[in-house]
Image (spheres, helix red, strand yellow):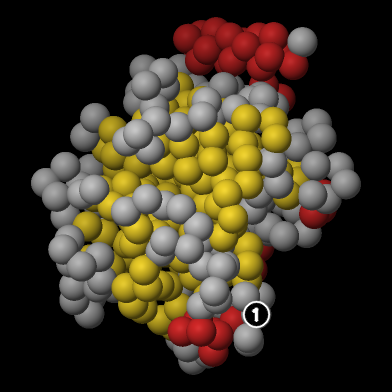
Amino acid sequence: MRIRRLLLAGAAGILALTAVGAAPAQAAYPNPGVVTGSTNAHDPSIVKRPTGGYLLATTGDGITLKTSADRTAFADAGKAFPGGTSWASSYTGGSANLWAPDLSYRNGRYWLYYSASTFGSSKSAIFLAISTTGASGSWTHVGKVIESTTSSNWNAIDPNLTVTPSGEWWLTFGSFWSGLKMVKLNSGTGLRADSTIHNIAERFVNSKSVEAPYIHYRNGYYYLFMSFDFCCQGASSTYRTMVARSTSITGPYRDRAGTYTTAGGGTEILASHDSIHGPGHPAVFTDSDADVLVYHYYNASGTAKLGINLLGWDSSAWPYVY
């Protein structure tokens, strides 16, 4: 029945889209698709493995890993860094907890960007590790990509790697303060290429709450997915998933109404509904059947769970969730 409701919700959204040329209204937001097994997750990122199946990384001590053969049933697969990450301890206050991993597979290797910080602090850093297998304990520490300090007006957490069609590597990141930033990377090393920091998005309400950027390229547009409002409050979380787009990787990005993201713009595509609280920290990838949206949400008891839905695209090339 749950699968049937999901399909019906998706069909209703598509019909509404056809009628008015806009994404489904909030009342039509679908519940997450069916996932089973080990489904507790916060800040998830998934990559399709060249050998088949999927590898997922989430926030956790040493970065939590999970695997799936079918994008539905997930199993625990240990930690990326079971031996600890001494290089990150000065940013985490000695905690083993590492945040918001960004996982991809390129050039025969898995690339893992992740952040180290403490809640509410801008003393933060983003690090890079690589692996040929993605397995627990196989990750090699490459180095620190970028850091922010307590006097910075931005925060070096929530990384996302984007590779353009021409082969340029860019890292988007940021949380609160002056918003989302972007730096160019060296495509050979995965580390920072120059000192320029591009401003991508900023909010001026709700404590300037914008974070968790993810850029997905499709048919000439770079789509900036991001989260507005407040995470990490269990069932009281108000996180919601927003989108804007640009024809240039560095922006400017504008929402459906034409508002620039540097002026607080963003079009909502998924928010709290029914027993789904605070769906956010989006990641997007193209699978064999569809474009896939991966995120976390909180259930009624306040546990962070893995959310997976599909993305459709309307006649104006804007995404909607089904």
Residue 121 seen by the camera: no
Quadrant in the picture for the N terminus: top right
Identified at 80% across, 31% down, the residue is 274
Q: Residue at x 62, y 30 (%)?
A: 73
Q: Nearer the viewer, residue 237 or 318?
A: 237
Q: Position of residue 307 (x, y in %)?
A: 63, 37
- Counting every numbered tag in the picture gives 1
* Residue 293 shown left or right of residue 143 in the figure: right
Write down the residue under mark 1. 95
Q: Nearer the viewer, residue 241 or 114?
A: 114
**In the rendered view, would you say 146 is above or below 82?**
below
Measuring from the top left, give residue 93's x and y in whole percent: 63, 87
> Which quadrant of the figure has residue 33?
top right
- Element class at badge 1: loop
Relative to 114, residue 253 above or below:
above
> Which quarter of the rendering shows the C terminus?
top right
Q: Is residue 40 left or right of residue 299?
A: left
What residue is shown at x 26% (from left), y 59% (from top)? Answer: 170
State whether residue 298 is above or below residue 262: above
Check the image and name the residue furthest to the right: 301
Q: Residues within 10 Å of mark 1 (few under 14, many from 20)?
A: some
Near-viewer residue (273 or 264):
273
Tell me residue 151's x, y (percent): 49, 91
Q: Residue at x 74, y 16 (%)?
A: 2
Asked if residue 48 can be seen in this view, the reply is yes
> Which amino acid type corresponds to the residue marked 1 in the rendered image?
Ser
- Residue 179, image x, y percentages: 47, 67
